[in-house]
Image (spheres, grey):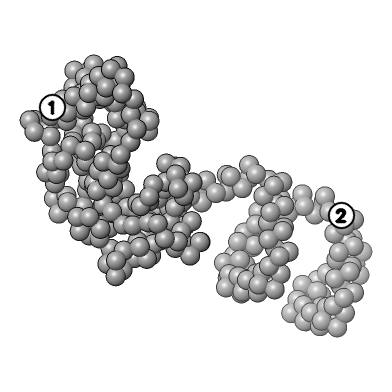
Amino acid sequence: MDKKKEYAIKYRQEHKEYFARKAKEYRQRHRQEVLLRRRHHYQEHRDEILLKRKHNPKLKEYRKIYHEKNKEKRNGYSNKYRREHLQDDARRSREYRKRHPDRIRNLNQRYYTKNKPFLNQKNRDRYIALKKLVFSKYAPNQIMKCVFCGENGLDFLTLDHIEGRKKHGHSTLFSSEKLWYHLKKNGFPSGYQVLCWNCNIIKWRSEPKIYSQKRTAIWARKKRAELKLEILSHYSNGKPKCSCCNFSIVEGLAIDHIEGKKVIGHSKDFRSMKLYKWLKNNQYPRGYQVLCYNCNGAKSDNGVCPHNFDN
């Protein structure tokens, strides 16, 4: 190496602060020119620059330290830019998600796995807040309780279509949060009331329905009622009643999987007569109990019925 170059390199190393200050002053005076030169250089050597960045551990570590040190500052710039360019930012986000669906899915899965307890609690809080808002709108005097029996436990309450779902054009799947969001979005229309699960199911079963009067149909309905009573009596050790709260109206009772349907391998559709016939054909296996619809619904939401919170 030429002695002049060696001397220049040595001189620069000994006066780093001076040259850094001069370079900074130059960039401030000729900002646009520097930016254009950088952009031009990047376009000419893009692949080489990206390759160096990818395999440079020092650069990765520097970036990590810089981001942690200037996190609030960078977040402030990002938030300000998004507020000023909402439409452009939303458009770029949509285009990116369309181009990289697998990457977005993996990122979402990793984020959910990492923050599962926090996200579950956040969703639960949002669910309860929405339920309280909607139910308070349809409860008399904003006192959330069953119109028929006066039950006031939030976990035992549901929203009932007063004149039936068909009048509103709602399917059986259009319930819970879907229905609540729909009502909130449409300004809480009339035609709904707050009932407990027991009163809701008993009201539905007591409504007049048109049944076939053929002998075979009448015989089949009688056999189904006898089978249900037999199953409920067996798992209640006598008179059918809820094993949690002792509710004893047969129309409001059902069979509950103690450890959940997934453990036993039953689908969501495996219920009612399908379940009753299966229980009888399999000699009344263990792992089942009789619950009223109040306790069953609350247990499904919380993992345990509120009646057993103190136990």
- Front one among 87 and 230: 230
Question: Residue at coordinates 72% horizontally, 46% vertically from top-left?
Answer: 99
Q: Is residue 72 above or below residue 103?
A: below
Residue 96 percent coordinates (x, y): 70, 51
Query: Which residue is farthest front?
Result: 213
* 278 shown above or below 253: above
Quadrant for residue 123, please give it. Answer: bottom left
Residue 177's x, y, as percent? 43, 53
Q: Which mark is residue 234?
A: 1
Q: Nearer the viewer, residue 75 or 48?
A: 75
Q: Is residue 153 left or right of residue 15?
A: left
- Determine which residue is flagged by label 2: 45
- Left or right, 244 with reference to 267: left
Q: Give the class, few, some or many, for how many residues have Cα within 10 Å of label 1's Cα (few <14, many ≥20).
A: some
- Does dot 1 land on a helix, a strand or a loop? helix
Q: Does residue 301 appear anywhere in the picture?
A: yes
| Residue at 14 percent of width and 54 percent of height | 310
